[in-house]
Image: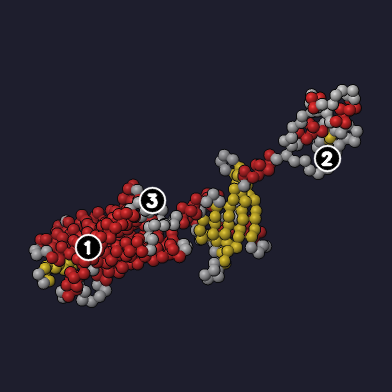
Amino acid sequence: MSYDYQIFLLIAPLMSLTVLVATGLIWSKRQRPGGRYLMWFAGAAFGFLLCNVFELVARTEYWTLNWAKSEHVWAAMIPLFWLLFVFDFTGHQKWTRFKVFWPLSVPSLVDVLLTYTNQFHHLIWTRERFFPVGNSLAMVVQHGPMFTAFIIADFLMLLGGIAIVQREFRRGNGFYRRQLIWITIGMVVPIAFSAVYSFHLIHGLNKDFTPLGFAIGAVLFIVAVYGRGFLDISAPSRTRIFDALSDGIVVLDSANRIVDMNREAMAFLALSETDLGMRIELCTQLVPLLEQYGAMEDTANIDVVANTENERRYKELRMLRLTESEDGRNGSLIVIHDITERVRFMDEIKTLRGIVPICARCKKIRDDQGFWQHVEAYVAEHSYAEFSHGLCPVCLDELYPDDLKTDDHLNT
């Protein structure tokens, strides 16, 4: 029965020292995206493992129980630091602000509170039993109803962090995918250790190796920092880039259902994220584009007018065919480009084109209303040209044949 405890006592001290050194090493990376919270995560993993070692080497039931309670403080911090790291690393710094993040910390705070008051309600441990392991004292507990609830909450936060990282970097190149592998492995290891203990997946295993699992995960992160350039380069969040585009972007699958769109497209189409999955036939602004696209091979274009509260805006809608190389499925991309300034510029440009009626004798020009105007008046009205009157050399000879033809006589 004490075999697994003895193995833990052999490995844990060395691993504690390794995590402590690793936490110190990452200090130099604390200003990088996610670096500060990764350091806190490693520090919490160190505290969790160290308290677990002290629990086993304690000689009295009082100290064994109190060291076990102290573990819960560090264990409750780990999911929080993990989420803070994920938010900061993926570019969602606004989610790390206290007024946004504090609701996520409520389960951890309640966990610590119930642990230290367990003797009054027994919601965390319904019963504790102590037995000797060599010269040390070990404790085996029977878990209460709230213990399972808090374990599930921790799992959700840890897995949720992995899902966020996966969502942000799954489309990245090989370098960022390697970072994703290190992040995933570093978190899957402690989750697996915790699941084995919490749900009794291995018969005869009584020792909780979760502290060791988080320590291993922290070491994997630190190795990645120095061996794989982890934290040295972090890709901008796909969401930030997508939403920062001035053009509206709508991504469709092969069935013409909306699978993704940025904020600009949502504003133009009056849609939200809850509308993902809808067919574009339900978007009246896109129906003409879809009809034209059906008659084309790869692209289609239309211009539309969007009336806002303050002004009229002109949009160019362009639909492009896409092919996903991995599975060969076809999809489409709609780009919504604002051409208001271009339309206004074209409206302001005055050009003379076509056949212009002009008198053969006096050279007056007849306008669209039938009135005859001098050439300079007509040209000035239909262009941005201005006239400066003078005399050409031929006229100068005819009008002033006896005067000296100099440049001073050219301008009146």
Q: Which residue is mark 1?
A: 17
Q: Which residue is mark 3?
A: 93
Q: Residue flagged by tag 1: what amino acid is it?
A: Leu
Disc 3 is placed on an element classified as: helix
Q: Residue 149 appears in which quarter of the rendering?
A: bottom left
The residue nearer to you, when weighing 242 against 102, is 242
> Which mark, residue 160?
none
Proximity of marks 3 and 2: CB atoms separated by less than 8 Å? no
Please tell me whether residue 99 is drawn above or below residue 139 in the rendered image: above
Residue at the far top: name it.
403
For marks 3 and 1, give the CA distance.
31 Å
The residue nearer to you, when weighing 214 against 315, is 214
Q: Is residue 37 visible?
A: no
Q: Position of residue 27 (x, y in %)?
A: 30, 54
The answer to which of marks 2 and 1 sits earlier in the sequence is 1
Q: Position of residue 374 (x, y in %)?
A: 82, 31
The residue nearer to you, when weighing 282 against 243, is 243
For marks 2 and 1, give the CA distance.
92 Å
Disc 1 is placed on an element classified as: helix
**For the residues carrying marks 2 and 1, which lies nearer the camera in this image?**
1
Q: Which residue is mark 2?
A: 356
